[in-house]
Amino acid sequence: APELSPLAEMGERDDESTLRPRRLAEFVGQPRVREQLRLVLEGAKGRGAPPDHVLLSGPPGLGKTSLSMIIAAELGSALRITSGPALERAGDLAAMLSNLVEGDVLFIDEIHRIARPAEEMLYLAMEDFRVDVVVGKGPGATSIPLEIAPFTLVGATTRSGALTGPLRDRFGFTAHMEFYVPEELEQVLRRSATILGVDLREDGAHEIAGRSRGTPRIANRLLRRVRDYAEVRADGAVTRDIARAALKVYDVDELGLDRLDRAVLSALVRSFGGGPVGVSTLAVAVGEESTTVEEVCEPYLVRAGMLARTPRGRVATAAAWAHLGLSAPPQAPG
Ligand code: ADP
């Protein structure tokens, strides 16, 4: 049976874990999700039963893993962590489920990538707290029903659209995480600066927040890079000018677009005349996996008004042409 992998093995960095909000009250932004989740958790606590299963969907770095930890902390429960790709065989999932203790929170990251047999096992587990373990092969195979402790599943996905209907239907509560507005990112940055002991000035926070792609993980990463610059090249204070100079070194532009974002826009505009072009063609043009382009780059480019998804493919907007310093053809969308 696989070990329940601790976060360290999933590439959790020390800094990332020190900067994680631990309680719902510390979790910045996402006011709607926070309020809804608080109701779900308080309701369940009042009834003394595990809350409904929770699905968290949204782009990477918006706080899905943090929220799963917060859910466990608020319930006073243990958190077990795994991921869709780790559950290749249904037996792996069965082992994990049968080790759960009543009230545990089971976090499955990238749940849309779970293999079909494991997914089917999950249906029964989520609904009836039961698994059917198949013993033997061929006509002699029998299935042995196994009770499992009532638990709460928290699934995270960057692509809720890729979840099958039956799986999606078994979550009692779905939270769609939105990109953060700059004021919220400033709050994230101020909190992180306090924890890390960085002298972050107001105009510095403002500058970094505006270039963080609406994403707390990126805000924290940029803060660490700007801190290096401030300490090595200046007196350590993170001001607007220091932030600008540092982010220039790291190739982060005024909109927060990074090298890959710009490569996607540039290919779309320069190689495909602004589109429409299919996402897989676009991915090949920039030498990336299409899932990365689709799940990491595109959501923010769409949000920033640079790219439109149409039934015929991806299209660059007039703003994208302008951002690349080119004039758009007359038919480019808004
Ligand atoms: P995801 O699981 O969606 O990829 P994480 O929960 O791992 O995102 O968040 C990445 C990092 O961003 C965390 O370590 C934390 O420091 C920071 N973070 C995310 N959301 C918030 C938030 N709402 N408030 C403060 N920090 C946050």
Image (spheres, rainbow, N blue to C red):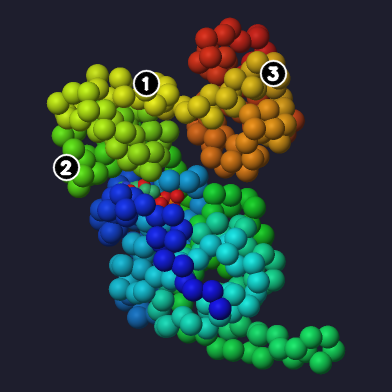
Q: Secondary structure at mark 3?
A: helix
**Label 3: how many residues lie within 10 Å, few (<14), some (14-19) or many (20+)?**
few
Give the Cα separation between the discs numbered 1 and 3.
Answer: 26 Å
For residue 216, side relative to residue 88 (left or right): left
Instruction: Choose between 113 and 182: the one closer to the eye.
Output: 113
Q: Report the residue at 53% width, 28% height from top.
A: 261
Disc sitting over residue 38 in the figure: none
Which tag, 1 or 3, sits closer to the chain's start?
1
Residue at mark 3: C-beta within 8 A of ligand 1: no
Which tag, 2 or 1, sits closer to the chain's start?
2
Vertical order, 259 against 163 (above or below): above
Q: Secondary structure at mark 1?
A: helix
The percent coordinates of residue 22 (x first, y second) are: 28, 59
Give the Cα separation between the discs numbered 2 and 1.
Answer: 23 Å
Q: Label 3 belongs to which residue? A: 271
Does any portion of residue 260 appear in the rendered image?
Answer: yes
The percent coordinates of residue 76 (x first, y second) are: 30, 73
Q: Report the residue at 33% width, 45% height from top.
A: 29
For residue 164, side relative to residue 258 (left or right): right
**Residue type at numbered disc 2:** Gly
Callout 1–callout 3 Cβ contact below 8 Å: no
The percent coordinates of residue 232 (x first, y second) are: 22, 28
Q: Report the residue at 18% width, 23% height from top.
A: 234
Q: Label 1 belongs to which residue? A: 248
Vertical order, 121 against 187 (above or below): below
Disc sitting over residue 197 in the figure: 2
**Residue type at numbered disc 3:** Ser
Q: Which quadrant does the C terminus fall into?
A: top right
**Label 1: how many residues lie within 10 Å, few (<14), some (14-19) or many (20+)?**
few
**Residue type at numbered disc 1:** Lys
Which tag, 3 or 2, sits closer to the chain's start?
2
